[in-house]
Image: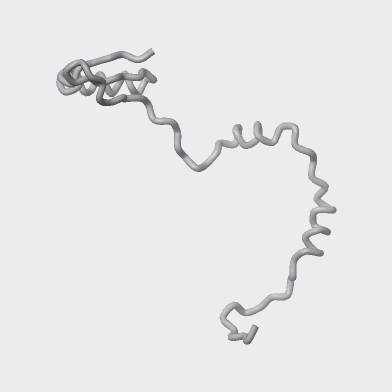
Amino acid sequence: MSRRITQKELRNDTASVLGAAEQGEEIIVTRNGTPIARLMPLVDESPFASTDKLKQSAVGLPRVDFRRFREDLAEAIDWDWRDPYERRND
């Protein structure tokens, strides 16, 4: 449920309004009775996942046979080192 406040209330009591939004409350700001803005807490937008989230996402996945995995890599990857700055006529 969201709380409605006037533009004047937002101006006069910004700190407590932002504090309420920070605590999870959604606040609709009105001007002359018309809703003009919505204040709400930001969702964590970090591109990084916590260790717990990562572990949880792996639940139920098949186990990896690392010996087989390395064999597959050895077949698929060309291990010959090449100087990236060497000019070639490829």
Image position of 5 (left or right of 86): left
Quadrant of the drawing holding the N terminus: top left
Q: Quadrant of residue 80?
A: bottom right
* Residue 13 point in image, percent of width and height: 19, 19
Image: 81 above or below 46: below
Please state, as top left, top right, bottom left or bottom right, where the C terminus lies in the image: bottom right
Q: Write the residue at 16% across / 18% down.
A: 32
Question: In the rendering, at what x and y percent does residue 2 appear?
Answer: 35, 15
Percent x, y of residue 9: 18, 17
Q: How is the image coloured?
A: one colour
Which residue is at a point 39% across and 20% down the rendered structure image?
Answer: 24
- 46 and 34: which is toward the camera: 34
The residue that appears at 83% across and 59% down in the rendered structure is: 71
Q: Nearer the viewer, residue 37 or 76?
A: 37
The image shows residue 16, relative to residue 62, as above or below, that is above
Q: Is residue 4 above or below residue 55?
A: above
Q: Determine the image quadrant of residue 25.
A: top left
Q: Quadrant of residue 7?
A: top left
Query: Nearest the camera: 36 or 22?
Result: 36
What residue do we see at 60% from left, 33% from top? Answer: 53
Left or right: 76 in relation to 29: right
In percent of width and height, residue 68 lies at 84, 53
Determine whether, in the image, residue 38 is placed left or right of residue 89.
left
